[in-house]
Image: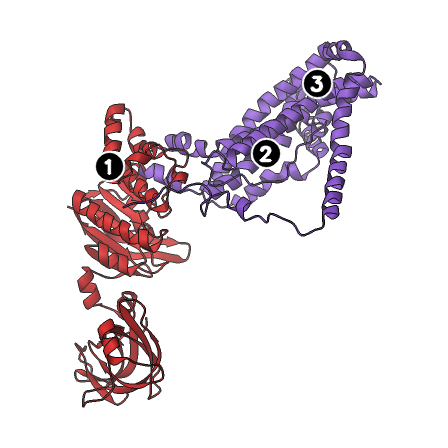
């Protein structure tokens, strides 16, 4: 039996769309130029100018002031708290996201649609409300407030509250990323692994996880960006005690309110850098999943991107 | 010594996928499960593999006498090739085939050298040695199917289960691969159960064919048995094209229009309405009646492409259209033209008197 191995660009492969795309559009050149100019102008005005201005303002008083602001104990404390909040909520949401996506994509059970809707809840309510929920539950006047005070446990206006609020807001990112991916991949590879004698654990580590790793990474990157940049929910539960319950976005706000504009921009530049790094990572992950490596049958669905670039 | 399924019923909600199915596959036998989509053939295969469990009752799945009804798929030692191959897309051909060996419990896991040797053997068997380092996405459909087969064989399964093994391939590759499968089976003699909706494939490859309909096995037998002696109109229809002529049965004959034709066997009824089944190649066409038992018809269309010529005809007594098949020689001798009137003779007429429905 002689069969030629499939090369790229054969039917069913990803490059099809590119080949079939029309080479020339029918609009006259000046229309095309005008449209391009409008688009570029828009991007310059609303994205590039603010981005440049953040760094320009941050460095207005010189590099010395810039690094002095970043070395300020209050700033360092805000950075630490942000790292703690993201460091706890991202891994936990990652675990939860994989578990939820696995459950939803690979099994049928009653209440599946309700679970799917609940996962989206943090996306659909305002972050301020998310913070309020925790104040209502754990605050001094809240449901568990008296009991918590009695046992000397602080959640609201303390680090646990910030972590909880961050977790709530970033809850859907990983799960939302993985569910469509795992649903598209189906169950047959796992079934194949089981018939071949693999137990549940082996099936997960050897088949499921390798298949979702890029989607998972993508979700984690978005989740992390949001966790570090979250303002609304955290602002409600934090109480903004400088040096104790201040995260980077809250610290920027405080510096700004105290008329320390260059300081505010200096700290904001950290979040801007985070956004740029996130974008770069995201592009890299997309590059790895859209078939340029030759292993992707199911490229990631391109979705709206809910994280904010600037705090 | 066999793989046996006893009293298996499986319902999905209100849908009965399997309705009290019994099936015995002898050791080393190659059995095809043939049926239209929704007939339960894939469900039956999955029940044997342990990917579905039969509904409560006295259902049993036996592998060589051992009751495996409640044993999960991972411990049944069945080899399963999925319809769309389900190769591990992140592993290359070699690692795909080695998977079943690598996930064995530590004590039973062969060493790296043994794994290499075993995978090498299988790669040779499927004639894909040079492609060991390729990923599934870099293989053609036929190559993927062969890798899936090798992967299933690597664990030395007690039974090999193939779900529409050639379903997603084009006609030419399909024919090559099914000949290859038959040859492979003759070499390694593994008890095999395979699902197909293609009657030609089932009749060509299998030792025995089980025909399923609505979750029941309608008939099981060797390809000759079921083709020559279909037990029900459904089987008759499913195994090839067929013409239906309504008429009346009377003592070993069937009267169609005004002509009597001999019937191979009748259930003993006399003078009842019945439907006569005739294969297109059992229809003879002549220009003259010649005193033979014939009825007149008009040719509507002729198609002589390929080794056989296909004709569509219309009964002149208003009994409807039917199809006939002539060999190339017969066709050239007769030179029929569309619109022409001819006489039709029926051979091998089969009657199913109690159940006309297909």
Which of the two labelled residues, at mark 2 and mark 3, occupies the earlier sequence position? 2
Residue A146: give x, y in percent of width and height. 68, 24
Residue A3 appears in which quarter of the rendering? top left
- Left or right of residue A81: residue B231: left
- Residues packed near mark 1 inside 10 Å, few (<14), some (14 to 19) or many (20 plus): few
Q: Colour of chain B?
A: red
* Closer to the eye: label 2 or 3: 2
Residue B150 appears in which quarter of the rendering? top left
Q: Which mark is residue A173?
A: 2
Spatial CA span between label 2 and label 3 = 24 Å
Tell me the residue at 82%/19% (across/down): A261
Q: Mark 3 points at which residue?
A: A245
Q: Is B44 or A55 nearer to us in this picture?
A: A55
Q: Which mark is residue B124?
A: 1
Q: What element carries label 3?
A: loop
Q: Residue A93 carries which label?
A: none
- Left or right of residue B147: residue A121: right
Q: Which quadrant of the figure contains the C terminus of chain A?
A: top right
> Can the viewer see residue B91?
yes
Q: Is mark 2 on a helix, strand or loop?
A: helix
**Vertical relation: A130 (above or below) B190:** above
User: Do the residues under discs 2 and 3 have CB atoms within 8 angstroms?
Assistant: no
Q: What element carries label 1?
A: helix
């Amino acid at each position: 039996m002689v069969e030629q191995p499939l090369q790229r660009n054969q039917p069913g492969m990803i490059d099809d769309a590119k080949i079939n795309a029309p080479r020339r559009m029918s609009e006259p050149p000046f229309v095309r130029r005008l449209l391009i100019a409008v688009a570029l102008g828009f991007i310059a005005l609303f994205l590039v100018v603010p981005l440049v201005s953040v760094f320009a303002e941050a460095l207005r008083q010189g590099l010395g002031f810039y690094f002095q602001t970043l070395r300020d104990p209050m700033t360092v404390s805000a950075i630490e708290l942000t790292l703690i909040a993201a460091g706890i909520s991202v891994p936990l949401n990652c675990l939860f996201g994989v578990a939820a996506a696995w459950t939803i994509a690979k099994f049928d059970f009653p209440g599946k649609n309700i679970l799917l809707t609940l996962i989206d809840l943090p996306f659909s309510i305002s972050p301020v409300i998310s913070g309020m929920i925790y104040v209502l539950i754990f605050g001094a006047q809240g449901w568990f407030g008296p009991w918590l005070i009695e046992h000397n446990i602080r959640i609201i206006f303390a680090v646990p509250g910030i972590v909880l609020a961050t977790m709530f807001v970033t809850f859907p990112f990983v799960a939302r990323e993985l569910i469509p991916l795992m649903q598209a991949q189906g169950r047959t590879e796992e079934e194949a692994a089981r018939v071949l004698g693999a137990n549940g654990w082996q099936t997960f580590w050897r088949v499921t996880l390798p298949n979702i790793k890029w989607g998972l990474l993508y979700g984690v990157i978005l989740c992390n960006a949001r966790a570090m940049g979250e303002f609304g929910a955290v602002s409600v539960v934090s109480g903004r005690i400088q040096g104790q319950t201040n995260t980077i976005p809250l610290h920027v706000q405080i510096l700004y309110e105290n008329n320390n504009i260059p300081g505010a921009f200096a700290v904001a530049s950290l979040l801007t850098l985070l956004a740029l790094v996130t974008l770069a990572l995201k592009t890299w992950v997309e590059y790895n999943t859209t078939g340029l490596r030759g292993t992707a049958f199911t490229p990631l669905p391109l979705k709206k991107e809910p994280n904010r670039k600037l705090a | 010594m066999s793989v046996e399924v006893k009293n298996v019923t499986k319902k999905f909600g209100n849908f009965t996928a399997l309705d009290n199915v019994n099936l015995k596959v002898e050791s080393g036998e190659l059995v095809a499960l043939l049926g239209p989509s929704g007939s339960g053939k894939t469900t039956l295969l999955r029940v044997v593999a342990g990917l579905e469990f039969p509904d409560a009752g006295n259902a049993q799945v036996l592998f060589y006498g051992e009751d495996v009804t409640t044993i999960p798929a991972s411990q049944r030692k069945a080899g399963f090739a999925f319809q769309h191959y389900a190769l591990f897309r992140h592993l290359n051909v070699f690692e795909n085939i080695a998977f079943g060996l690598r996930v064995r419990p530590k004590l039973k896991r062969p060493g790296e050298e043994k794994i290499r040797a075993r995978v090498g053997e299988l790669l040779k068997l499927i004639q894909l040695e040079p492609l060991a380092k390729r990923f599934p996405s870099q293989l053609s459909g036929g190559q993927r199917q062969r890798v899936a087969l090798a992967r299933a064989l690597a664990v030395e399964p007690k039974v090999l289960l193939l779900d529409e093994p050639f379903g997603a391939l084009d006609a030419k590759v399909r024919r090559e691969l099914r000949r290859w499968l038959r040859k492979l089976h003759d070499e390694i003699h593994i008890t095999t159960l395979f699902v197909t909706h293609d009657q030609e494939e089932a009749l060509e490859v299998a030792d025995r064919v089980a025909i399923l309909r609505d979750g029941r096995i309608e008939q099981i037998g060797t390809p000759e048995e079921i083709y020559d002696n279909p037990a029900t109109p459904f089987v008759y229809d499913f195994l090839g094209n067929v013409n239906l002529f309504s008429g009346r049965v009377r003592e070993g004959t069937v009267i169609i229009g005004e002509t009597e034709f001999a019937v191979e066997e009748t259930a003993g009824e006399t003078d009842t309405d019945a439907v006569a089944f005739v294969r297109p190649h059992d229809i003879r066409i002549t220009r003259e009646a010649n005193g033979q038992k014939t009825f007149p018809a008009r040719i509507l269309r002729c198609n002589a492409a390929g080794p056989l010529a296909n004709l569509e005809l219309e009964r002149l007594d208003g009994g409807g259209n039917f199809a006939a098949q002539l060999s190339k020689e017969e066709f050239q001798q007769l030179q029929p033209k569309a619109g022409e009137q001819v006489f039709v003779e029926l051979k091998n007429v089969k009657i199913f008197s109690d159940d006309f429905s297909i």
